[in-house]
């Protein structure tokens, strides 16, 4: 009963480094999302995917890249990390349609120094 | 563009009180509305999902209502407990378009 799994839970990066946040879901959901949440702020959509091979930008895509080669996995790549990317990152997935309940991972806390 | 507003941003109540959290949205063309709970430093836990064809959903001490015509949803918490202290967020999903829009949340503190 894993749901949405994110790794790593915590990471410290130096400015200019790159890394990938992993996200996998075992519910066979077509729709997957990456959000970031800054302290005291709401969730901002970075990228989303409506199925394997299909991705699109959200509100704040700059500095990030995604891929969706399988239904299960939706990794988020940070290139040339900047202090502005210090945040908590959440991956989520859902089915389509009116009954589609959104499920979240536990989050990945990233600090860029 | 869909905008979701939650007022108040913070709420403090004594234990045992019944309370209502509000969520307003600007575009009534939605598939569903979902309420979440977020504890400090944790992820989001789904509480209730109301489909656009439904008026309300109940789970234990929680009852969520939806009025699409007025662009409003409320989350009613009965007999509040200190363990209910958390931030509550609502999110709306539009049809045929998969970007879910979140409100900024209401931070609830239940005082023993």
Image: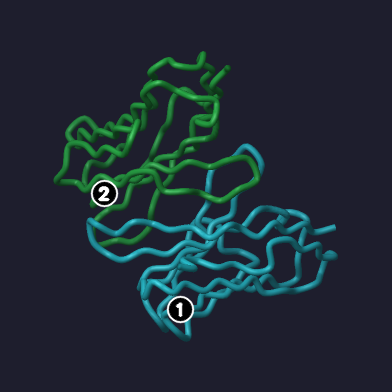
- The residue tagged 1 is A72
* Same-chain status of marks 2 and 1: no
Quick one: label 2, few (<14), some, or many (20+) residues within 10 Å? many
Residue at position x 38%, y 40% in the image: B3
Position of residue A112 measured from the top left corner of the image (x, y, whole percent): 79, 59
Residue B110 located left or right of residue B33: right
Residue A73 located left or right of residue B25: right
Vertical position of residue B46 compared to residue B98: above or below? above
**Apparent colour of chain B:** green
Q: Quadrant of residue A108?
A: bottom right
At mark 1, the secondary structure is loop
Position of residue B52 measured from the top left corner of the image (x, y, whole percent): 19, 46
Q: Which quadrant would the C terminus of chain B be assigned to in this image?
A: top right
Q: Quadrant of residue B6?
A: top left
At mark 2, the secondary structure is strand
Quick one: label 1, few (<14), some, or many (20+) residues within 10 Å? many
Q: Determine which of the numbered discs, if any, sits on residue B32 in the image.
A: 2
Q: CA distance from mark 2 to mark 1?
A: 24 Å
Contact (CB < 8 A) between labels 2 and 1?
Answer: no
**Chain letter for the residue marked with disc 2 in the picture:** B
**Chain letter for the residue marked with disc 1 in the picture:** A
Position of residue A1 measured from the top left corner of the image (x, y, whole percent): 45, 68
Closer-to-camera residue (B83/B50)? B83
Farthest residue, direction left: B53
Position of residue A100 measured from the top left corner of the image (x, y, whole percent): 29, 59
Vertical position of residue A111 compared to residue B12: above or below? below
């Amino acid at each position: 009963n894993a749901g949405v799994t994110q790794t790593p839970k915590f990471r410290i990066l130096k400015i200019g480094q790159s890394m990938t946040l992993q996200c996998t879901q075992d519910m066979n959901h077509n729709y997957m999302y990456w959000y970031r949440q800054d302290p005291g702020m709401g969730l901002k959509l970075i990228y989303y995917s409506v199925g394997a091979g299909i991705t699109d930008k959200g509100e704040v895509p700059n500095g990030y890249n995604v891929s969706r080669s399988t239904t299960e996995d939706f990794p988020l790549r940070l290139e040339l990390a900047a202090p502005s990317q210090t945040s908590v990152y959440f991956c989520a997935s859902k089915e389509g349609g009116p009954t589609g309940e959104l499920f979240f991972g536990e989050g990945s806390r990233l600090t860029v120094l | 563009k869909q905008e979701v507003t939650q007022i108040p941003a913070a709420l403090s109540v004594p234990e045992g009180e019944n309370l209502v959290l509000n969520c307003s949205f600007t575009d009534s063309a939605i598939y569903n509305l979902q309420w979440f709970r977020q504890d400090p430093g944790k992820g989001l836990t789904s509480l209730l999902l109301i489909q656009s064809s439904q008026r309300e959903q109940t789970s234990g001490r929680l009852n969520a209502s939806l009025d699409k015509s007025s662009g409003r949803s409320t989350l009613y918490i009965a007999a509040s407990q200190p363990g209910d202290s958390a931030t509550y967020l609502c999110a709306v999903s539009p049809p045929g378009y998969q970007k879910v829009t979140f409100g900024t949340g209401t931070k609830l503190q239940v005082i023993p």
